[in-house]
Image (tube, coloured by chain):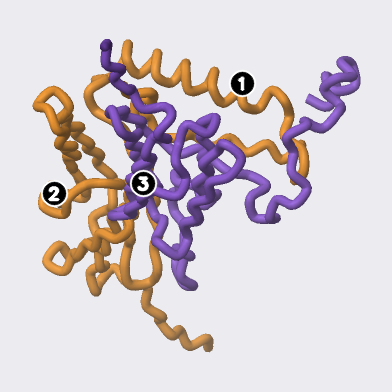
Amino acid sequence: MRLVRYTYPAFHSTPSLGGFQRSPWSGLETEIDRLFETALTDFGGNSSEVRFPVDIYEDKDNTYVRAELPGVNRDDISVEMTEGYLTVTAARKTAGTNVEDAESFAFTRSVSVGEDVDVQKVGAAYENGVLTVTLPKREEAKPKKIAIAVK
Amino acid sequence: MSLLNTLVPSFARTAATQDENRPADLAQTVKPAYEVKETADAWGVTVYLPGVAKDGLEITAEEGQVRVIGRRTWKQPDGWTMLHRESTSVPFELVLGHDNAIDAEKIVAELRDGVLRLSLPKHEAVKPRKIAVS
């Protein structure tokens, strides 16, 4: 018996309500949003693929991409770089006791990371269900100070 | 929402289940994705908690409810600029009510790679029992 299909939980902030009281409607709103989300993705998109959240950060030396992928084996994650796009593909297999229970979900997402990546030095780490891909910037792309003498 | 609260008086009352002792960082939580599977002896619950490590996880069983709270432990390092953000840093909270059908002493939990697997053994009284006909 499966109660909930895997859709990523969406958090809608409600700043007007303050910290101590939740509106009686907020649970209903969340459920209705999720209902529409699942209905629309089933009609529009490929419903066998699931979307996962991706964050992108940068500092002066690297660009970092964090993807939330809980419960995936490291061997089933593949990270590829082509022409300024980073593609993360992961498969989650759950082996049940019967053959019918074994399911597999495929996740894939492409993110544009720009042209300034040193492709040889890209690294990835997977911890606590979060994949962090570190993309070092090419030397030429790092911000450099140019001293200009003012006459 | 507050206009609706003034128009309909019953909404202005705080919900009876609001707990004043709630820790401040749990004022807003999000419900994680989860699955429940049932076998003859137990319920198996799989909860997806990306970014939660063992020290951020709290599981309590009380009053006919099993409550799972997961706090993400990752902090954005200084020097990182955020370009695009889709995940949240709000704690996860999942409450499962079971009406005392679960033997709380024997709950087994395992957290690996952001997935929490709980095994909630059924109370003896709830297990299907064969009755012999003499």
Element marked by disc 2:
strand
Residue appearing at x 33%, y 45% in the figure = B117
Q: Quadrant of residue B12?
A: top right
| Residue that numbered label 3 is attached to | A54
Which chain did the renderer colour orange?
Answer: A
Q: Is residue B30 left or right of residue A38?
A: right
In this rendering, the answer to whether A7 lies above or below B26 is above
Residue B127 is situated, as x and y percent measured from the top left of the image, at 36, 27
Pointer 3 indicates a residue of which chain?
Answer: A
Callout 2, which amino acid? Ser
Q: Which mark is residue A78?
A: 2
Element marked by disc 1:
helix
| Residue that numbered label 1 is attached to | A28
Callout 1, which amino acid? Leu
Residue B126 is situated, as x and y percent measured from the top left of the image, at 42, 27
Q: Nearer the viewer, residue A27 or B76?
A: A27
Query: In the figure, what tint was chain B given?
Result: purple
In this rendering, the answer to whether B131 lies above or below B90 is above
Residue A63 is situated, as x and y percent measured from the top left of the image, at 32, 62
Pointer 2 indicates a residue of which chain?
Answer: A
Q: Is residue A130 visible?
A: no
Counting residues from the start of the chain, the first of labels 3 and 2 encountered is 3
